[in-house]
Image: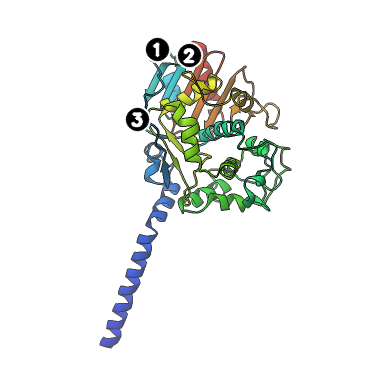
């Protein structure tokens, strides 16, 4: 080969290598987050990942004032005989049971500990509902029956144009959305890739155009509905959710550790599933709801909102689990029985008449198996009956 040509080719190859390397370095964060999304729930990773989400995704710390945590005095009680088998079967990593505000049982498993900040997944939806109730009471939002576009005008022309705030709180927007976590091309997994690659969740929501039913006529669990609630809150207040949540809900709860939110690439909180707290602090939130919005003598959420949000109000099918304003109820709820629920086995279960709160964090890869939810609910009820 001509020496000059050989030298020129070498220079071209070197420059190409440098450009590719620089490009990979520039995009390495995106690549790492995308790889994390694709292996987030792998058996060998899931437990570690669920306690260290800040290592993989954009996030925003939520520093809280230095103050003594709300007391949860120990008062051990006997647990049902099948508890250990249930913990193993459902891959529980953290379990805190409160009876009348006292810790009746506490345990951590699979190499995790009480100091872990654990991912909420959709339990975060119930936190956002609580924040919404506070802001509604304060007058930042006029009415549940306002259209969402009144506060989030960027949704005009989308599938949400015509939906009310009540509709999205009830998961009755009618918006077409595939929530199948096992389908790579589902909407929920497309949304996850937007989150990992630094995209905008607001743009993702505004880009949805399909409708399965007129708003308010049918219930369908659509996680992006919760993001729209967040858009409404931000539009109404001009503030971000982490700041509001820390001020209005988390600081008054007096938690043991400052939590954090996962965010998209624009710094917008992943409100439909991105809170990370200790298991005891999830229990404190449940205890506040059990007390109709107050904790340790402090009013945090209006009692009227606690009662409204945990009442079955969504148009769910007869005989199915029921839904309120971002809270679940069993198909056959006892009076004052409701729960927050997240994928892979995250729960805050509340039984008001019996004074019981159960906070559960898990890495349950079988959470979608037939009977898994029923098994969890049955164990919660066994625990209540034994206390």
Other residues around mark 1 within 10 Å, as few (<14) / some (14–19) / many (≥20): few
Query: Relative to residue 375, is residue 79 drawn left or right?
Result: left
Q: Which mark is residue 203?
A: none
Q: Residue at x 52, y 40 (%)?
A: 271
Q: Which mark is residue 75?
A: 1
Q: Residue at x 42, y 38 (%)?
A: 62
Q: Can residue 184 be seen in this view?
A: no
Q: Check if mark 2's residue and mark 1's residue have beta carbons within 8 Å.
A: yes
Of all residues, the one furthest to the left in this rendering is 3
Other residues around mark 2 within 10 Å, as few (<14) / some (14–19) / many (≥20): some
- Image x and y of residue 198, in percent: 46, 53
- Image x and y of residue 262, in percent: 45, 43
Does label 2 or label 1 sit earlier along the sequence?
Answer: 1
Query: Relative to residue 243, is residue 44 drawn left or right?
Result: left
Other residues around mark 3 within 10 Å, as few (<14) / some (14–19) / many (≥20): some
Q: In the structure shown, which secondary structural element does the residue marked by tag 3 occupy?
A: loop
Q: Measure how far apart labels 3 and 1 are at the Cα level.
A: 20 Å
Whether 110 is drawn above or below 19: the answer is above
For this rendering, which residue is in front, 192 or 216?
216
For this rendering, which residue is in front, 330 or 91?
330
Whether 106 is drawn above or below 218: the answer is above
- Image x and y of residue 49, in percent: 39, 40
Task: State the residue position of label 3.
Answer: 115
Q: In the structure shown, which secondary structural element does the residue marked by tag 1 occupy?
A: loop
Q: In the structure shown, which secondary structural element does the residue marked by tag 2 occupy?
A: loop
Q: In which quarter of the image is residue 14?
A: bottom left
Does label 3 or label 1 sit earlier along the sequence?
Answer: 1
Of all residues, the one furthest to the front in this rendering is 139
Q: Check if mark 3's residue and mark 1's residue have beta carbons within 8 Å.
A: no
Q: Can residue 149 be seen in this view?
A: yes
Q: Measure how far apart labels 3 and 2 are at the Cα level.
A: 23 Å
Task: State the residue position of label 2.
Answer: 100
């Amino acid at each position: 080969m001509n020496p000059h040509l050989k030298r020129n080719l070498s220079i071209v190859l070197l420059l190409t290598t440098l450009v590719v390397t620089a490009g990979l370095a520039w995009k390495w964060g995106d690549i790492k987050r995308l790889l994390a999304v694709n292996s987030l729930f792998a058996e060998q990773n899931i437990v570690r990942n669920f306690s260290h989400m800040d290592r993989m995704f954009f996030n925003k710390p939520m520093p809280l004032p230095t103050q003594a945590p709300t007391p949860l005095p120990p008062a051990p009680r006997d647990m049902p005989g099948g508890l250990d088998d249930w913990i193993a079967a459902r891959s529980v990593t953290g379990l805190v049971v409160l009876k009348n505000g006292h810790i009746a049982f506490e345990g951590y498993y699979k190499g995790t500990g009480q100091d872990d900040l654990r991912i909420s997944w959709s339990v975060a939806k119930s936190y956002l509902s609580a924040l919404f109730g506070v802001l509604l009471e304060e007058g930042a939002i006029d009415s549940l029956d306002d259209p969402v576009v009144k506060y989030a005008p960027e949704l005009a022309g989308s599938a949400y144009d015509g939906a009310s705030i009540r509709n999205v709180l009830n998961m009755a927007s009618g918006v077409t959305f595939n929530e199948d976590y096992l389908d790579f091309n589902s909407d929920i997994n497309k949304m996850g890739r937007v989150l990992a690659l630094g995209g905008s969740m607001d743009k993702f929501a505004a880009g949805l155009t399909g409708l399965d039913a007129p708003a308010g006529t049918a219930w369908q669990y659509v996680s992006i509905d919760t993001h729209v609630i967040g858009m409404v809150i931000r539009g109404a207040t001009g503030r971000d959710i982490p700041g509001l949540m820390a001020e209005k809900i988390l600081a008054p709860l007096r938690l043991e550790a400052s939590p954090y939110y996962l965010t998209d690439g624009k710094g917008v909180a992943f409100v439909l599933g991105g809170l990370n707290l200790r298991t005891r602090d999830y229990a404190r939130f449940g205890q506040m709801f059990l007390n109709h919005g107050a904790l340790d003598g402090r009013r945090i959420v209006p009692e009227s909102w606690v009662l409204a949000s945990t009442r079955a109000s969504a148009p769910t099918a007869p005989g199915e689990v029921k839904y309120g304003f971002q809270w679940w109820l069993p198909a056959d709820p006892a009076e004052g029985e409701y729960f927050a629920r997240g994928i892979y086995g995250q729960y805050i279960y509340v039984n008001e008449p019996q004074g019981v709160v159960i906070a559960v964090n898990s890495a349950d890869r079988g959470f979608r198996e037939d009977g898994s939810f029923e098994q969890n609910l049955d164990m919660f009820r066994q625990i209540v009956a034994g206390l």
